[in-house]
Amino acid sequence: MRIGLTGSMAAGKSTVSAILFGLGFHIVDADKTAHAALGFPKVIAELSAAFGENILDERGLIDRKALARAAFVSGSSTEKLNSIVHPHVFEAMLREADEAESSGWEHIVFDVPLLFETGFERFCSKVLCVVADDETRYERIMLRDGLSREEAAARLARQMGQEEKAARSDAVIVNNGTGAELEEAVKNALEAIGISPEAGSNEAELESYLPDDLDE
């Protein structure tokens, strides 16, 4: 089964992704894929044609800070960036899923923060959504990024509301408690979409997979 995993900022999606990895699921990470995609020759050529060669460094590779300055000045320029990068990211993610299934993986998890915003849910049989109460999310963002409450609220306001994400998902994972409670919630969500949480295990490799930073 191909499963979409999403959630709003600081809800705990990365931790859930790590738990799923430990249970034996292959994880396809959209953020890592997007980072890699900026090194694809075709993407470099398309972005430099769209935003100018000033976004390239002395080696002819994408200067990510320069690209950000060029692409995030307006909504239309951000849409242009997404229209170039997203198709390549989607293609790479689906290719990784195909290869994983060919290697014997039964379940693939697409870890995609903007799953619904980008329309990637159409490639998923089921969708899991991670949610947490607003106060918990505020505290996580403020601690992680050194922001004020107002700045944290502004970041959250720029995203699709987690209530809408939850309503569009097949199962919801609530992350307001302990790690043990979250793991139990993950297993319950898997059962809700018809998957045994004991399908397999990557526990020996889990420590190296866990995120270093506070969760997205």
Image (cartoon, rainbow, N blue to C red):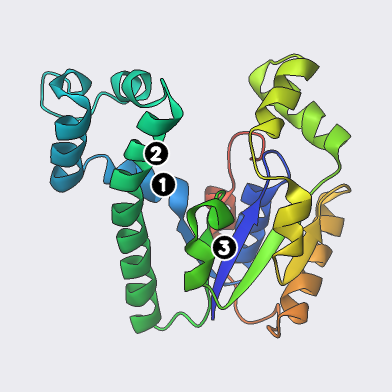
* Residue at 37%, 24% in the rendered image: 68
Q: Secondary structure at mark 1?
A: helix
Q: Residue at x 36, y 30 (%)?
A: 77
Question: Which mark is nearer the camera, 2 or 3?
Answer: 2
Residue 174 percent across, percent down from the top left: 83, 56
Q: Mark 2 and 3 residues: CB-CB less than 8 Å, in contact?
A: no
Residue that numbered label 3 is attached to: 204
Asked whether the residues under the numbered discs 1 and 3 touch, taking CB atoms below 8 Å apart as contact, a structural biologist would say no
Q: Is residue 142 above or below residue 115?
A: above
The first of marks 2 and 3 along the sequence is 2
Residue type, numbered disc 2: Glu
Element at label 2: helix
The answer to whether any part of residue 202 appears in the image is no
Local secondary structure at mark 3:
helix
Which residue is rendered at x = 22% and y = 27% of the image? 51
Task: Tell me the distance, in whole angstroms, between the alpha carbons under discs 1 and 3.
Answer: 22 Å
**Label 2, on which residue?**
79
Horizontal and vertical percent position of residue 165: 70, 56
